[in-house]
Amino acid sequence: MSSLGALIIVLAILMTIIGGETGIRSFFSVLINSLLLVLVAMLISWGLSIPIITAIFVPLKLATIIFLGTHDYTVAKNSFYASLIVLSLVSVLILGIQYLAQAAGLGPEAGEILLGHSQMPGISYGQIAVTVAIFSALGAVAEAAVSMSSGILELKKAKPDITEEQLMKSGAAIGYDVLGTAMNTIIYGMFGSFLSLFLWYYRLHYSFGEVINDKLFVNEALIIMYSLLGVLLTVPLATFLLAKGMSRQSEAKNGNEKTRDQEL
Amino acid sequence: METKKQRILAALVLLALGLGLAALTYFKTTGYKNPVAVITDTKIKDRLLKKETDIYGNKDEERRQYLHVQVLTGKYKGQTFETVNTYYPSQLVTQKYRAGERVFVTVTDGSLALVSPKRDWILVMTLVITLALMVAVVGRRSWHLIVSMAISWILFYCLILWDVAVNGAGIIWMFSLADIVFSFFSLAIVQGVNKKMLVTWLATLLGVFVSFALCYAVIKLTGETYLNYEMGDYATQDTRGIFMAQALLGVLGAVMDEATDIVSSLYELIQHKPEITVKDLLASGRTMGQEIMGPLINVLVLIFISEALPETILYFRDNNTIATTFNFTMSLGATQSAVSAIGIVLTIVFASLCSLLFLKKPQKGGKQE
């Protein structure tokens, strides 16, 4: 049996025991999410339009992460819209910055990988770099949106008569915590992902100037910053959407059944 | 507490200063190993050399740019050279240059060769945009986040120095120790050294090390089947050790943050409701954990696996089967994701148990503030 298979089985068991029904759903959200990445790679390799594939798979992946991973529908719906808007904004930013950075493709460091492979594959690695950047930021944005939305909803539940203004203010406080959380996850995730690249730079005596101009380093550093930018944009937007949505909801409720609103 | 207007004003000032800094970086020519040059053409002559179809049936072009490059630093300062650059439009390994951009070059025996475009100013610009947005969103407390981020980078750099100095010997122990130090500093900066922070620290370490030991055992028991450590990129030392080190480091942030969330909430709960039963407390920790774990695991999966996408596409492009492609490109990232996911799930248990053991007072002595 392959080691990866065994680890996945252990994970499935643990998630079922500890997570219960939510755990099982989260497990499938992770599994589907990974399979979607393989599918994206295949579709792109068949020569289909990279921007269109990206535009289709971003909402698809968000839906898998958010709707399968959380069990509160209000939280999920709000997080989904917030992350979709944020990712559209971040994508525009990514397009602009990647255009300027000219850091697509594999670096000269990747020589070994390229051995025996086509060096002229006939698809745009510039576009692929944009897609990779968007997907890398996607997870962090979705996580932040879910934490923000559920945090604010908790607050609203505890204090049903809170005003929209107060809600926005508390949103900033919750946002600080969410940001702290996301930042560590992103940065250590990246350290763990690129340790060997950094060792490579050091061992081959790259100077500081060379490192900060190197294609791969620039690409990685930019991906960290796109994720942070995405999380930063999510904080006010998720708060705003939820505050708007809830005030509309409570107005509607006030019209129909006032008593139930007070009970909450 | 500062107002929203002040925050946005501060962010705009920072943005203006930072963009100035980015411009300075763009025009900076000193302090690099290679001379800096500028492409003087306003429109680069670009000629199609030939259309090619490789053995896999991929169609690509070979094109050549004819450039005029003026050197800005070094021995050849002020001189203009003519040079050519051959590239494939897919730009997998080759680079297309743009009119008017700044580049690094080498000059030997009177002939000039292009090295790469100058990219550092883009990093400065993006960093400034990120920091300005951070100030606009969270205000003065951005400092904590920036200091914590800077310390992480410094520690990471020290770690690399250490690893290279001992040539990767005992790498698992080294990175275990690094995890202990990293998490202590990170948590201490944000929370200060107090009982709650120490409990969070303990939960983090238990989460990382117990799950790592479990995964290590599983990997050993299955005989490391289909684990192609040697396919890890940029290997400069024992690839198996590097993989383990990456797994130890990659999961730390997520586990630390999860432990913080759970311990802080349970701490609040105990403060407000000292009479809460053991069962309710554990249930509460479990519910919180269930909510966080799915999205958190997905963050890491996307970081670890997306990274392999360019290579994966290349493998598929060259008519490899799904199994071969997966084994050679994504399987290490997927394994790292699985190890991290197990860490994230187990941390729920440890964070809840540690809160119960160390934060909850026995019924009578319930502290009320």
Image: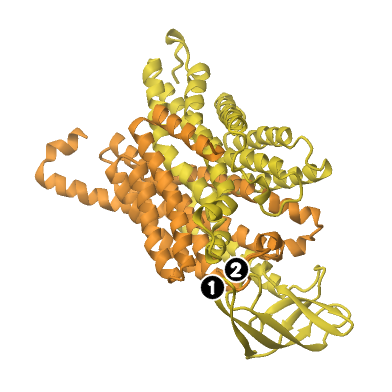
Q: What colour denotes chain B? A: yellow
Residue at position x 59%, y 73% from top?
A: B55
Disc 1: which residue: A124
Mark 2 surroundings within 10 Å by alpha-carbon count, few (fewer than 14), some (14 through 19), many (20 or more): many
Q: Is residue A263 above or below residue B96?
A: above
Q: Earlier in the sequence, mark 2 or mark 1?
A: 2
Q: Is residue B359 above or below residue A76?
A: above
Q: Where in the figure is residue A42, as x and y percent of width and height? A: 46, 61
Q: Is residue B288 left or right of residue A251?
A: right
Q: What colour denotes chain A? A: orange
Q: Secondary structure at mark 2?
A: loop
Q: Give the amino acid at mark 1.
A: Ser
- Which chain contains the residue that carries disc 1? A
Look at the numbered discs 2 and 1 and tell me whether their residues touch, using CB distance below 8 Å.
Answer: yes
Q: Where in the figure is residue B47, as x and y percent of width and height? A: 63, 90
Q: Give the amino acid at mark 2.
A: Ala
Disc 2: which residue: A104
Q: Could you tell me if residue B134 is visible in this image?
A: no
